[in-house]
Amino acid sequence: MARKRRKNKVKSYFKVIAIISCFLLLIVFRLFDYFEIVTYRSISQAVGLYDEPISYNPDATAVHFIDVGQGQCVLICSGGYNMLIDGGEKEYSSKIISYIENLDIEKLDYVIATHPHSDHIGGLSGVIEHFEVDEIIAPMIPDNLVPTSNSYYNFLNAVKQNGNGMTKAVVGEVYNLGDSQFEIIAPLSDESGDLNNYSVVCIFRYGENTALFGGDASKSEEDDILESGINIDIDLLNVFHHGSSSSSSKEFLYKASPEYCVIMCGADNSYGHPNKSTIERLEMYTDNIYRTDLQGTIICEMDGNGNYRFFSEKE
């Protein structure tokens, strides 16, 4: 009888040990999660606005849709390499520089100027002058359409000071960006009378993750892409021309079939961007529509397996 009681005591003792061990393991895992989270860099640290932001992993491959009002600026980071697409108006240059610096980025491997309108290249001159830039890619513009604006002059002057010259955007060229790559798929025509239709359009690929970027490309350039037969089946679409009614045609969206869309435009802008009809067309394919005019800067993380996580500056 005494031996049986001792056995029961031993069993109880091991049960207690097991419970305590499970509890300690739970604490360890929670601490691991905590330290993993606190190593994340918050979006507000980059933007410099909020004290309690949503956090994202700074080591992840990510697309940063930097809020520059009625303009466009996209930073792509992958495997320690970085690419900037456009830079908004000149007044946003310092904000972009601060954003990039706060991510501990000292060099831009690529800068793409999609087309020479001030809301896309105005802020690039300051960025190019401030950072080391390996390669600057831009479309070839016909002589009769070359802008005479100060923003274009400042951009060309910054490119000259950079010393590496400017690379013409050539359809079919593929560039490596760390663990990912991007391919130029437009402009395909040099006969348009509209600068928007010379926008550099590129597909970004990271494993099974895909995204499409295209400045202010309108239906005419979209049609050129469709006629070329290029595969534009992607997951993430940086909606062209700030959500204008002249872009994101039904035919183009049918081929692209995006699961996520990001529209970059200014709050209460005078152009009425994004257009209601464009939103309706996008909603035929997805409910995952993000807008910088409503949510501020937006970050999209990719894992290479076709998964995406979004964080925004505002709810």
Image: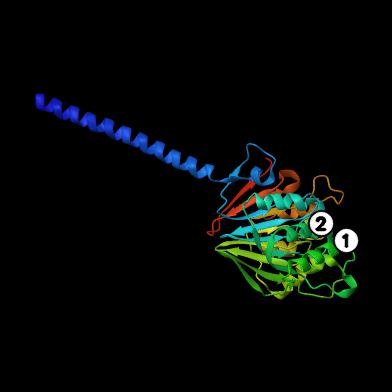
Residue 281 percent location from the top left of the image: 74, 55
What SS does tag 1 mark? helix
Q: Is residue 143 left or right of residue 102?
A: right
19 and 73: which is toward the camera: 73
Q: Quadrant of residue 51?
A: top right
Question: Could you tell me how far apart the alpha carbons at marks 2 and 1 are, in whole angstroms?
Answer: 12 Å
Image position of 299 with respect to 152: above or below? above
What SS does tag 2 mark? helix
Residue 276 percent location from the top left of the image: 80, 50
Q: Quadrant of residue 209?
A: bottom right
Image position of 189 with respect to 252: above or below? below
Residue at 65% x, 60% y is 107
Residue at 66% x, 47% y is 46
Circle 2: is it few (<14), some (14-19), or many (20+) Cα within 10 Å? many
Tell me, yes or no, if residue 283 can be seen here.
no
17 and 75: which is toward the camera: 75
Residue 198 percent location from the top left of the image: 80, 69
Identify the residue under disc 2.
119
The chosen color scheme is: rainbow
Identify the residue under disc 1.
150
| Figure disc tally | 2
Q: Is residue 17 left or right of residue 216?
A: left
Disc 2 or disc 1, which is closer to the eye? 1
The amino acid sitting under disc 2 is Asp
Tell me, yes or no, if residue 267 can be seen here.
yes
Q: Say which label, 2 or 1, has the lower sequence index.
A: 2
Residue 27 percent location from the top left of the image: 41, 36
Q: Which numbered disc covers residue 296?
A: none
The amino acid sitting under disc 1 is Asn
| Quadrant of the frame with the N terminus | top left
| Quadrant of the frame with the C terminus | top right
Q: Is residue 32 left or right of residue 129?
A: left
